[in-house]
């Protein structure tokens, strides 16, 4: 775990200079051969979702990976040998100061499969990635979805935020009951400070 934290540390810089906080910095790494040109959307979603939950400054790293990489990360950090849609790593968030420092890993293959189940193509898959990103940010803000109440609260907020961004209610809470207890649904990774 130290190697992981050390690797992330190189990307961090102080967010305060001359007494003025800098806005949230968002870095997106697309780790797939084929680009969906989703980076501008993901950057906009990250900034607006973070602001909606009170994060004003800091650094957020977003990695978009394939199913094999996601399965490896899920196994390494949560001991679950299956891919998942999103992993969120809190590297030192402080909501009282509006400070976000974290890494979110999104699985493009899971998003693509979910979009295909709903009869959609690339546009729907991009919206699905946006949903996963919002979900990860909500985890970094301290929200949990391990209880039915927390699940409803979190997914209702996701749909509200995505609707404000013009993507509509991507998750569609009305269909959530069948997904609530699904293992491997999503995972908030370990706190890495």
Image (cartoon, rainbow, N blue to C red):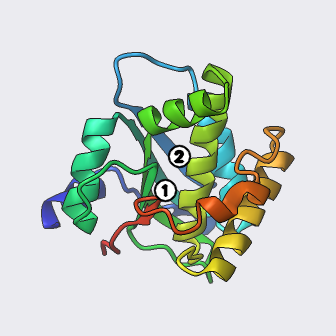
Identify residue for label 2.
Answer: 26
Contact flag, marks 1 and 2 (Cβ < 8 Å): yes
| Residue shown at 34% from the left, 17% from the top | 33
| Residue shown at 41% from the left, 16% from the top | 34
Residue 39 vertical placement versus 62 (above, below): above
Label 2: which secondary element: strand
| Residue 64, x across and y down, in percent | 42, 37
Q: Nearer the viewer, residue 15 or 170?
A: 170
The quadrant of the image that shows the C terminus is bottom left
| Residue 37, x across and y down, in percent | 56, 20
Residue 183 vertical placement versus 86 (above, below): below
Q: Residue furthest top?
A: 34
Dividing the picture into quadrants, the one containing residue 122 is top right
Identify residue for label 1.
Answer: 59
Whether residue 21 is visible here, answered yes or no, is: no
Q: Residues within 10 Å of mark 2 (few under 14, many from 20)?
A: some
Q: Nearer the viewer, residue 100 or 17?
A: 100
Q: Residue furthest front?
A: 178
**Does residue 18 appear left or right of residue 66 in this picture?**
right
Dividing the picture into quadrants, the one containing residue 1 is bottom left
- Label 1 to label 2, Cα distance in Å? 6 Å
Q: Residues within 10 Å of mark 1 (few under 14, many from 20)?
A: many
Whether residue 83 is visible here, answered yes or no, is: yes
| Residue shown at 19% from the left, 60% from the top | 76
**Does residue 53 appear left or right of residue 185 in this picture?**
right
Label 1: which secondary element: strand
| Residue 26, x across and y down, in percent | 53, 46
Q: Which mark is residue 96?
A: none
* Number of marks in picture: 2
- Circle nearer the N terminus (1, 2): 2
């Amino acid at each position: 775990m130290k190697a992981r934290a050390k690797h992330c540390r190189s990307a961090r810089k102080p967010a305060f200079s001359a007494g003025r906080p800098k806005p949230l910095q968002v870095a997106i790494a697309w780790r797939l051969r084929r680009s969906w040109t989703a980076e501008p959307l993901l950057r906009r979603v990250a900034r607006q979702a973070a602001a909606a939950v009170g994060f004003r400054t800091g650094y957020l790293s977003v990695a978009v990976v394939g199913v094999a990489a996601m399965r490896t990360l899920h196994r390494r950090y949560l001991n679950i040998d299956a891919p998942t849609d999103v992993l969120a790593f809190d590297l030192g968030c402080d909501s009282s100061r509006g400070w976000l420092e974290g890494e979110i890993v999104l699985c493009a293959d899971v998003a693509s499969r979910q979009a295909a189940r709903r009869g959609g193509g690339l546009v729907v898959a991009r919206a699905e990635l946006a949903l996963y990103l919002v979900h990860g940010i909500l985890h970094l803000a301290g929200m949990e979805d391990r209880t039915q109440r927390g699940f409803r609260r979190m997914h209702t907020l996701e749909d509200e935020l995505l609707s404000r961004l013009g993507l509509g209610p991507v998750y569609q809470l009305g269909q959530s009951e069948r997904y609530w207890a699904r293992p491997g649904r999503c995972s908030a990774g370990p706190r890495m400070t």
